[in-house]
Amino acid sequence: MMSKLKRIVDESREHKTKEIDLSDRGIQNINEVPGLMMLEHLTHLTMSHNKLAAVPPSIGELVNLQLLNLFNNIIEELPTSLSGMQKLKILNLGMNRLSHLPRGFGSFPSLEMLDLSYNNLSEQSLPANFFFVNTIRTLYLSDNDFETFPSDISKLKELQVLSFRDNDLISLPKEIGELRKLKELHIQGNRLTVLPPELGNIELTGTKSVFKADRNPWVHPIQEQFALGKTHVFDYIRSDTYKYLYGRHVNADPTPPPKSTDKAKKICKKPLHSKK
Amino acid sequence: MCAALVNGASNGDGVVLPICKAKESGAAVTSETYEYEQAQAKQRKQSESEEKQDAGGLRHVDSFKPLIPSVSMTSQLAQAVCVRCRGGFTPVEQMVNSNGEIYHENCFVCAQCFQKFPEGLFYEFEGVKYCEHDFHMLFAPCCGKCEEFIVGRVIKAMNNSWHPECFTCQICSAALADVGFVKNAGRSLCRPCHNREKALGLGKYVCNKCHTIIEEEPLRFKGDPYHPFHFNCDNCGKELTSDARELRGELFCLPCHDKQGIPICGACRRPIEERVVSAMGKHWHVEHFVCAQCEKPFLGQKHYERNGHAYCEMHYNQLFGDVCYHCNEVIDGDVVSALNKSWCVRHFQCTCCNTKLTLKNKFVEYDMKPVCRKCYEKFPLELKKRLKKAAESERRQ
Ligand SMILES: [Zn+2]
Ligand SMILES: [Zn+2]
Ligand SMILES: [Zn+2]
Ligand SMILES: [Zn+2]
Ligand SMILES: [Zn+2]
Ligand SMILES: [Zn+2]
Ligand SMILES: [Zn+2]
Ligand SMILES: [Zn+2]
């Protein structure tokens, strides 16, 4: 096994291949791939479906990396050097065991796509500068534990895709309405009862848009509009009638609906030894 | 039961509210103006003040300068008795005469603080005299909101007294003193707010124009419900019913909607008498059908549509040439379209392992991202189960 990995690295060094695929090779530690962190010319590194528990700080030496895919590992800690990667555009950290992000995580200078789906993240996990990544186009946070999301979301002016499928959201920040480029919003399977009327400022019903919002305990008038179709929902939340009802609902400060237990079996929630 | 006092109970709009239906529809506001505005009172002469007496049981009286008794009055003096202490007067004692009542100088004092009346001004209530300060303390009403004394107009409502500016709608804070209020679940509300609350309880809508409940079918216009009778057909002028139709921001009765006689230009909204261009579900004057970017009329040339706007070829490409989801560049060459997105052919790949995909490969949709079969097989069973259930629930919707 070791020798096979070594051969891949050697080949890349000799032929200056810019993309390396090391997915599904049972790697537990990046040191098992000698010389990998010296391939300065690498632009794409895929290491999904391995057993990596950590990412070494030396990852920062791959200064030309544009894509780093660490999907489906068991990573709990990330090095702060990660966000210093000048050219990184696509970072997939989906299906790991992250419950927090390192300090300064928001300082990526050119990150465009960030996938953090299926981890153990919540609003408390975000470092103070998270919303500095204003180059970001797609942010996937499905299958996490967010109950609220900071109003600073409005700083992500380039955001086109925002995915919160199966979190514990009890409200959406009204600032979401400032994301003028948003084309996809996934909020299925949360605890949402109302939508901020400001969401009506964005167009999410066209053919190139995605608006998924089922499996939420919507208040009756919204549920009714969903039964008619998404365009009706958007027409409705733009109406004065809804703005009035929404204000009234928010003022009443109702107790949020209970959490669903659907995600309780997430593998990243279980202690490690029980994962085969 | 009845929330408020009083007479006419009619408000500015001439709506008379039946007072004793207070529970449901509430009562009208009335105000009482107590007769003790100090500024006026201080200027009053004694002769006036003797006549001054009002129905409310409050009386304002001015005291006047103490009398210096003369010798010839000595015998009368012997019979004179102080109203307060019942004692007589010695010839050298000064006497105070207030509206014919005689007092020792030391007995003509506030019943509360036993001090002389500042500037001789006192207030009388049920035969007892008070200084201005104590009178306010004891009898002036206190505002139910700001808890300050109310001098001048008092609003009596909701079993409390209020400054006119402090008595407001508990939902929208509109001043209620002059427009009347409605009692709703223990709150004082303005009529529009009350109607909305009531409609809500009945599962009905409130008209966005007159703010009363719509008993029959509402007419929806720009998303809000209205009584149909507030509108007339934009074409024939007939009063509308709930089956009226909205068309390009105007309302038409059903027959007029169906046979829209002369086409109306989607840009200038005037009738089109000459050549008509029909595009994007609307009609246009030839010279008014223009590129949304450069505003040049197409004049029969091909146009491209996007988000309800028309563009010339150059501007359409400049603005909307398909952009690749992966590399964020305008796609040069063939476009892969899937999952409401576009990709460069070489950039269409599995989001989990970056393996290149073609539309011939079977892939799985995961948050509208493509995932190859091999990766999907590796998903935890619990996630696959949830995603399957989620897809079923989405299909049902
Ligand atoms: Zn006194
Ligand atoms: Zn007051
Ligand atoms: Zn009101
Ligand atoms: Zn009306
Ligand atoms: Zn025109
Ligand atoms: Zn143009
Ligand atoms: Zn591309
Ligand atoms: Zn794959």
Image: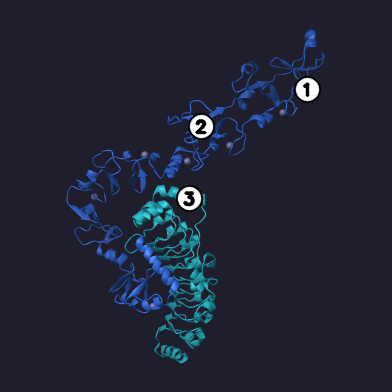
Q: Which tint was used for chain A? A: cyan
Q: Which residue is mark 3?
A: A249
Please say whether residue B70 is visible from this viewpoint: no
Label 1 CB sits under 8 Å from any ligand 1 atom? no
Q: Secondary structure at mark 3?
A: helix
Chain letter of the residue carrying label 3? A
Chain letter of the residue carrying label 2? B
Q: With B269 as the anchor, is A180 left or right in this view?
A: right
Amino acid type at circle 3 is His
Q: With A115 as the anchor, is A229 left or right in this view?
A: left
Label 3 CB sits under 8 Å from any ligand 3 atom? no
| Disc 3 + disc 1, Cβ < 8 Å | no
How far apart are the alpha carbons under marks 3 and 2?
A: 29 Å
Q: Which residue is mark 1?
A: B106
Which quarter is ligand 1 in?
top right
Label 2 CB sits under 8 Å from any ligand 3 atom? no
Q: Which chain is blue?
A: B
Amino acid type at circle 2 is Val
Relative vertical location of residue A181 with respect to residue B122 in this rendering, above or below: below
Q: Residue at x 34, y 76 (%)?
A: B347
How far apart are the alpha carbons under marks 2 and 1?
A: 45 Å
* Residue B72 position in % (x across, y down): 79, 7
Q: Which residue is mark 2?
A: B29
Chain letter of the residue carrying label 1? B
Relative vertical location of residue A187 with respect to residue B26 in this rendering, above or below: below
* Residue B285 position in % (x across, y down): 21, 51
Q: How many dots with numbers?
A: 3
